[in-house]
Image: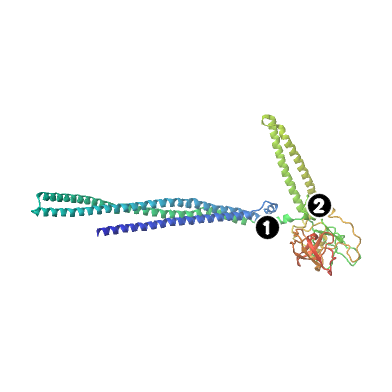
Amino acid sequence: MLEERMGDCWSRTKDQFDNLEKHTQWGIEFVEKYTKFVKERSEIETNYAKQIRNLSKKYQPKKNSKEEEESKYTFCRAFLTTLNELNDYAGQHEVISEDLTSHIITELTRYLQELKTERKSHFHDGRKAQQHIESSWKQLEASKKRFERECKEAERAQQYFEKMDADINVTKADVEKARQQAQMRHQMANDSKSEYAAYLQKFNQEQNEHYYTVIPNIFQKLQDMEEKRIERISVCMKKFADVDRQVLPIVGKCLDGMTNAAESIEPKADSKQVVESFKSGFEPPGDVEFEDYGQAMKRTVSETSLSNTKESKEKPGGKTKGKLWPFIKNKNKITLNSHVRNLIEGSVPEDFSHLPPEQRRKKLQGKIDELSKDIQKEMDQRDALTKMKDVYIKNPQMGDPASVDPRLTEIGQNIEKLQSEVQKFEGWLAEVEERMPSKSDSQRKSGLYETQNSTTVSNNCAQDRERPLSSPDGSYTEEQNSEVQVKAQPIPTPTTTTEFDDEFDDEEVLPTIGTCKALYPFEGHNEGTISVAEGELLYVIEEDKGDGWTRVRRNEDEEGYVPTSYVEVFLETNAKGAMTYI
């Protein structure tokens, strides 16, 4: 019964250790799971910050003139500020990722190693204590069995002695021998009894210590370990929230910066900037004088009108379409404006004569300012080298004064070259300012022409001033040096006009005379041209007249000129209108 009771106690103790071992192992796995969760959150923050930075970088303005032009508008500057604030916003998410890694992931990884080591040590002590008490119990059982055996042997020896002593046939020597044997067995039984008593006392002490001291201490250590684990998880969860909370003020500042940037946008200022940028400086034409057809007199034109009777003629009762520059017509021959030809070929006049007066004045002034800055830089270098030469002259050991002279000569030549450039641009600027209307005259107009004449007068004035003072994009050209001269043609027959026709002023749409296929792609940046893709099919409405351009149409609203060498033309044999002129 005692053995069964002790076995039950040891079994229950072992079961408790097994339960605790499973629970503590589950606690370690939970810490590992939470560490993995924080690590994945950190990776998400890192990737998010990277994507935000890439987005901000993608839409940052490039280093070119177009982006510099855009920077003068408040909404463009606001967008740039938003991109910069967004970049800072991404930086805060990087801070979150770094703090999660350093304050949680690293600490939990190190703590996991310590936790596993401590748990292993406690369960090792528990198994060792269990083995020790089991060993003591086995020793006690062995001494008890030995004592029982000795007692039985002593009892048998005593019975044998008494039997020998009662038998009269047994010699005295045999009786004495039996008596000594019985005494020896009794002594051995007494020794076994003393040994059993000692083992029993020792086992009871060890058992009491095991169940009241050793095992409770081990369980207490396991309990403390578990509480520390839970407390560490609690602290990490608080840090997890604090990491986000710490960056909220800076994130708020970033958002406030975006809001302030949006509130700084000034629509009126931007619209005024547009007016200032595209103001042409042309003076509006004067009133159109009344023409009395009841008297035999030629049509007169206002002195302030920009039209020329030799270059335009009125077409009564019709409305005109916009003219397709850069084509200038001279009787039956189409010629290219020289400045527009430069634009098509990719070159820009050095004096910016392709621009309207106001825009040309700004460009020339900007060029003068740029050259002035370069001159100032060269002069600063010259002054610095002059001072260096003076130091070399006073202290020859520091350097040779003559070594500076080649550089001084080069800088002097550069300054002279830049000054000549400045004088050249200043001359062009003075020429432009002389041709621009005076301030008192310009008070009659505004950058966007707030008031206009009636529709009929406006159309006639537009026809009168379209050639040759402005190009299709509103550029200004000088008549005396900008057009390609052509020889005079013979006087045409009565069926052919001798005046310059207004371009595309016909009420009717020109008929199709054939088709064409684009052999090469053509961008068509200039007004009057049309962009085509390689292999595209278009309708031909006017064939090449010898100037290298063919007029085509894509649909009712899209038509223009393309280089004849860029297309393969298929004319219809019975087509009408093949000899139309523009």
Looking at the rendered image, the quarter that the C terminus falls into is bottom right
Q: Which residue type carries mark 2?
A: Arg
> In the picture shown, does residue 39 fall above or below 579?
above
Question: What's the residue at 44%, 53% (across, down)?
Answer: 235
Tell me the CA gap for discs 2 and 1. 30 Å
The image's mark for residue 369 is none
Q: In the rendered view, does 25 fall on the left or right side of 173?
A: right
Label 2, on which residue? 435
Label 2 crowd bin: few (<14), some (14–19), many (20+), radius 10 Å: few
Q: Which mark is residue 268?
A: 1
- Is disc 1 placed on a helix, strand or loop? helix
- Relative image position of residue 523 (x, y in whole percent): 74, 59
Most foreground residue, 487 or 512? 512
Q: Are marks 2 and 1 in contact (CB under 8 Å)?
A: no
Q: Number of callouts in the render?
A: 2
In terms of depth relative to the viewer, which is nearer, 255 or 514? Answer: 514
Residue 97 placement (x, y as % from top left): 52, 53
Tell me if I can see residue 238 in this picture: yes
In the rendered structure, the answer to whether residue 260 lies left or right of residue 195 reads right
Q: Residue visible at 91% across and 61% down?
A: 491
Residue 346 x %, y %: 76, 53
